Image (tube, rainbow, N blue to C red):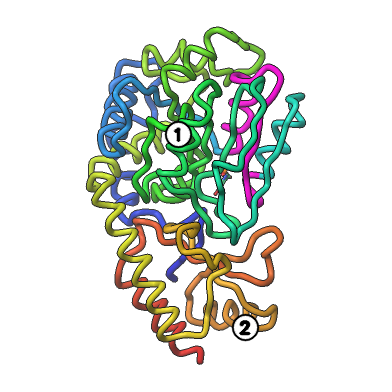
Amino acid sequence: MITFYPGPSKVYPQVAQYAQEAVNSGIVSQNHRSPAFVKLSKETISVFKEKLEIPANYWVFYASSATECWEIIAQSLVQKQSHHIYNGAFGQKWAAYTHKLGIHVQEYVFDVNEGLNVEQLSIAQETELIAITHNETSNGTALTNTQMAKLRQKYAEQLIAVDATSSLGGVYLDFAQADVWYASVQKCLGLPSGMAIMVCSPRAVERARMLDARNHYNSLAFMIEKMEDWQTTYTPNILNIYLLNRIMQQVPSIKTIDEITQKRLANYLQFLEKETDLILLCDKPEARSATVLTIKGSLNRIAHIKAEAQKQNIILGNGYGTWKDTTFRVANFPAITDNEIALLQDFLRGLK
Ligand SMILES: *Cc1c(COP(=O)(O)O)cnc(C)c1O
């Protein structure tokens, strides 16, 4: 079986060996306040920051999922008002969760094919936090580092929080351009599901300390207190922290991974255009995701392609939300090999 599902997605094959190592070494049975855990956690955060080029003064936290990060942000960094910018299902869900937690949510919804025009945004001064989805997994669109920088420049006062769940670890992100970035590990990081990583600027940490919200076990103020000793407020996913550590040691630096991801994207685009009649949902090249390709077609055609793929033991990502039956998705994540991509292209070529 080979899988192109954009989450949970293919894990690095080395995960099997590293998991064995984690059990044999005894780390997964160690107390999460023990010196052994503290050492693992500290080293993991250090190698994670190094490989992803995260600014030295940024903090890294562990959480259970990207979904949990939506709640942590709403509960710990906003008192009254947030502004959500999105064009798809994940951005919309984030806004909905925040609203349910009693925050006054304003929204700016943009079109998949128009892309985001930062100049057109008009965000109220009293907005405390801008929530934006870097890579919209539901429709295969993404923002550029330039757009993120423009947003930062235009809204210097507000905290900017970014859902980078399906891009962090797959493309280069300019972390300095926002205050909170988070991702669950089962996408570009090529690990088993059940953990998320949240990256925070000193300004976000300062705000959390100032608001001092403490009603939840993962209130950021508590998380900060614990992270001062490289610890967590709850028993964390020690196995996944160990795996993250080992995978981060193994992978090249993010600029090298970014180059590979972009090259593979260019190859996919050329392949689709020259050798198939398939087209991407997003027709604006600069608005397309490099890590999640979303291919559209008629209901019958998409159903046929998915069924044929399954017969050949190739798992394609189902469409999501509005695009459930009229698209399929292909993850372009680092753990996927060139050989697997060649097999997928052989399959798609043969469809004609
Ligand atoms: C997958 C995904 C999520 C949800 O991740 P969980 O680990 O299920 O919480 C949130 N946002 C985006 C953009 C995603 O791709």
Ligand 1 within 8 Å of the CB at mark 2: no
Element carrying mark 1: strand
Q: Position of residue 16 (x, y in %)?
A: 34, 51
Q: Residue furthest front?
A: 119
Picture quadrant of residue 60: top left
Which residue is pictured at 58% across the width and 77% down the height? 306
Which residue is pictured at 46% across the width and 82% down the height? 348
Q: Is residue 70 positioned above or below 224 on the image? A: below
Q: Is residue 167 positioned above or below 82 on the image? A: below
- 154 inside magenta stretch: no
Q: CA distance from mark 1 to mark 2?
A: 37 Å
Q: Is residue 208 positioned above or below 134 on the image? A: above
**Structural crowding at the residue carrying mark 2, measured as other residues with C-alpha within 10 Å and reported as few (<14), some (14–19) or many (≥20):** few
Q: Position of residue 31 (x, y in %)?
A: 40, 20
Q: Position of residue 76 (x, y in %)?
A: 60, 19
Q: Earlier in the sequence, mark 1 or mark 2?
A: 1
Q: Along the line of sight, which residue is nearer the eye, 273 or 45?
A: 273
Q: Ligand 1 sits in which quadrant?
A: top right
Residue range highlighted in magenta: 67-91
- Quadrant in the picture for the N terminus: bottom left
Residue type pointed to by label 2: His
Q: Along the line of sight, which residue is nearer the eye, 183 or 127?
A: 127
Which residue is pictured at 43% across the width and 69% down the height? 2
Count of labels shown? 2
Label number found at residue 304? 2
Ligand 1 within 8 Å of the CB at mark 1: no
Which residue is pictured at 63% across the width and 83% down the height? 301
Q: Is residue 24 positioned above or below 283 on the image? A: above
Q: Residue furthest bottom?
A: 352
Residue with the mark numbered 1: 197
Q: Along the line of sight, which residue is nearer the eye, 48 or 162?
A: 162
Residue type pointed to by label 1: Ile
